[in-house]
Amino acid sequence: MKNYPLWKIFIVIILLFLGIIFAIPSLLYKENTGSWYLDNRLNLGLDLQGGSYLLLEVQTDVLIKEEFENFSDTVRIIARENRVKINNIEKNDEALKVRFDSGDKLKIIREEFLKNYRSVNFAITNNIISITIDEIYKKSIQDAAIKQSLEIVRKRIDESGTKEPLIQRSGRDRILLQLPGVKDPERIKDLLGKTAKLNFHMVDDDDTKSLSLNIAPFGRMIVSDIDNEDIKYLLEKKSRVGGENLIDAYASFDPTEGHAVSFRFDTTGAQKFGKATSENIGKRFAVVLDGVVITAPVINSAITGGSGIITGNFTSQEATDLAVLLRAGALPAPLEIVEERSVGPGLGADSIAAGKIAAIIGMVLVCIFMVLIYGSFGLIANISLIANLFIIIALLGTIGATLTLPGIAGIVLTIGMAVDANVLIFERIKEENTKNKKVYETIKKGFDRALSTILDANITTLIASLLLFIFGSGPIKGFSITLSLGVIASMFTALMLTNLLVHFYISFASKKEINL
Amino acid sequence: MFGLNKIIPVDSDYKFLNYRKKFYIASGVAILLSLILLFFKGLNLGIDFKGGTLIEVSTQNTNIGELRDILSPNFNEVSLQEFGDENTIIIRLQNENNQESIETVNKVKQLISDKVQEFRRSEFVGPTISSELLWKGFQAVSFALFAILIYIWLRFEWQFGFGAVVALTHDVLFTLGVLSILNVEFSLSTIAAVLTIAGYSINDTVVIFDRVRENLRKYKKLELLDLFNLSINNTLSRTVMTSITTLLALLSLYIFGGEVIKPFALTMIIGVLIGTYSSIFIAVPTLLVFKFRPQEDDEN
């Protein structure tokens, strides 16, 4: 060992020590303990610990449509106030076109309209106005909707009792959810699938003609009953009070009507509700949730206390979920699930067990093979391989990486590929051995010659796995991380640890020649 | 130690390149067949790229036929398949749109919940996502090939880069062809396997190229054909050793790693075999096309 630089020995020992120390928490502990050191563990991905991954798309085109609906209503109101007659209205997702009987007063209408909506394009040609919006306007609608949706989704998930959920925006109009340990993803999907827009509308029971013709006059709308589509109600289009004024909602039980949801309004809501009920005693009001009427009771007396109860044919779970939805608030736009991956805890545990067995057997096979081919040098390579595994696990644990099933595959693959650097070195030593007489010189040349090959070969693998990381999703990223760390760790172990061990072996066994 | 270290002697002298025409023809036919297969039969796309719903259940006393009888009348496109053993069954459904998927899964769960011991997993991939994933996978593979080409070009000379990419494209197409014949499910993890194969194959090729470059410097007078043969033989035992250790690990993964990982392991095994073959029989012979003798190497 004479002339072997001390600092190299030192570095190898330090790194190995750190590798083992930081691999221990991942290898031995499963639960969080609260200790900084022990909690520095590998996280298990959803595919290993069980749980749900959901990708939701916010249906923002609905909002654009709604916005044009608002435009058209506003134009009609302004036109009525100014006594201008509308000939016809054309709407699509891009523009609103209103044809008037005459072109008079259109400038006044424009002025009035732009007071309400400032940054729209309002063009007048003869007796036609056309209203369009630009991309910036659209984007601001979308952005606001997604921000609000994120908040509401977070509230709903929290209310559902899911621990440690990950909720984040993904791309332009998507929300990504990771819900570890969720056993019943269907319930979560139900919770997220509802917009939960709650509104109280007055029922128009006088105009039976419109209802029978199924044509809603201006300012009215026709809505069906939740339990029976054939039962229709003619309602005032403008709601008297909405879900945004609720401050609390909880499941309750009504002796005559069964499971119900009790709610309480804030001050504004209570005032509005009180006014509406006191003015309309004897008439009916309808509770409309996401475009269907849940119930439409007759107002017996003014309700001024600001609290009430919604009944319907609820089951206990439905009442609880509705209360959750009302507490969390309405989504600005519907959410659509575009991707889902749910894994039960059984499959996750099986995958971990299978992965462990595959890793151990793969390791044993490779180790036996190395000893068969390279003898004592094979043993050295095996020590490096084991050290390599510890380092990978320690690195994964310290950077807080998530271990996925493809990640386990990456580790097993690394076991096979990690000995490559050792093989390159040994083969070089073997070659040099036929030319040189001096043992140390042979070893030195072997390592030196192998160096550039090892670098070139491993950098190409790193390029491939970097691209996997960039383009891959979820579990595949896990694979690219373990593969990259494996490649990096194997370069260190081969060039530093194997080097040290070979020198140690040669000098300890006072070898005068190399049997490779 | 056990005498096995001499399996491939240091001074092996196989004339690989002398048979190169045979291997060109063999590989050419393989690539042509692969392309025909990919074009007419295609890959067995999993739900990652095709979209749809997949539910894995474990049962105890129910056989696959019973479940099929319950589900078939209720869904248009439903297929059931045993997964590893007869108590694990995969149910695949095709959905028209995103909204339908929630109802589909709920309906399946209701219909068979009393026959099933555990719902092990359920996956749904919507049509927009599946086409995005396919596009991203395609991008990843193309960028990887391109980036590797650039790297080789910087480190070696462009002729080497050409040889490497010919070999790589050969590996990717050939592997996809074999996947098509064997009807292996093509999913996100298969794409990962294909990219890893690209990495592995190039790794193998680079080791030989490294030696070619070194020998070009060392033996100025040697015929190129002999020089290439020599370089392959120099690195032959390493090529074989690394392939064997990698295959041992992959074999263990294939046999013991569980059903979900099987397509990945199988793809890798196929790819490692093809990659090892192509490094020797395709990548190096391609260099002969150029008849080059570099004047000065970039490292000097």
Image (spheres, helix red, strand yellow):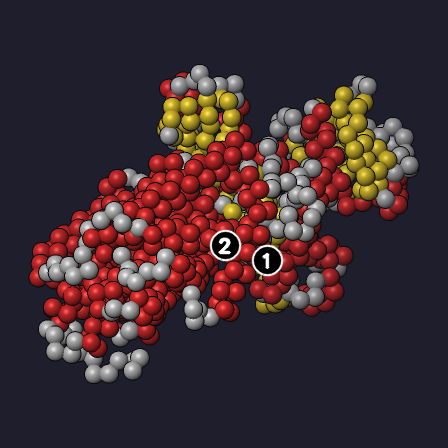
Kindly state the secondary structure of the residue where label 1 is placed.
strand
Do we see residue B66 in this rendering? yes
Q: Do discs 2 and 1 share a chain?
A: yes
- The structure residue drawn at horizontal position 76% and vertical position 40%, both measured from the top left corner, is A327
Name the spot of residue A88 as percent of width and height, x first: 60, 53
Which amino acid does the dot numbered 2 rest on? Answer: Ile
- Residue B53 in picture, x, y percent from top left: 45, 36
Residue picked out by circle 1 = A96
Towards the viewer: A434 or A235: A434
Residue B111, percent from left and from top: 50, 22
**Which residue is located at x 63 percent, y 58 percent?**
A143
Marking on residue A391: 2
* Dot 1: chain letter: A
**Which residue is painted at 81% across and 35% down in the image?**
A263
Residue beneath the point at 13% across and 53% down: B26
A171 lies left or right of B51? right
Determine whether label 2 and label 1 are within 8 Å by CB.
no
Q: Is residue B158 above or below residue B57?
A: below
Q: Quadrant of residue A306?
A: top right
Q: Which one is in front, A138 or A206?
A: A138
Task: Assign the C terminus of chain B to one quadrant of the image.
Answer: bottom left
Residue A220 seen in this snapshot:
no
Which amino acid type is marked by label 1?
Answer: Leu
* Crowd band around label 2 with a 10 angstrom C-alpha radius: few (<14), some (14–19), many (20+): many
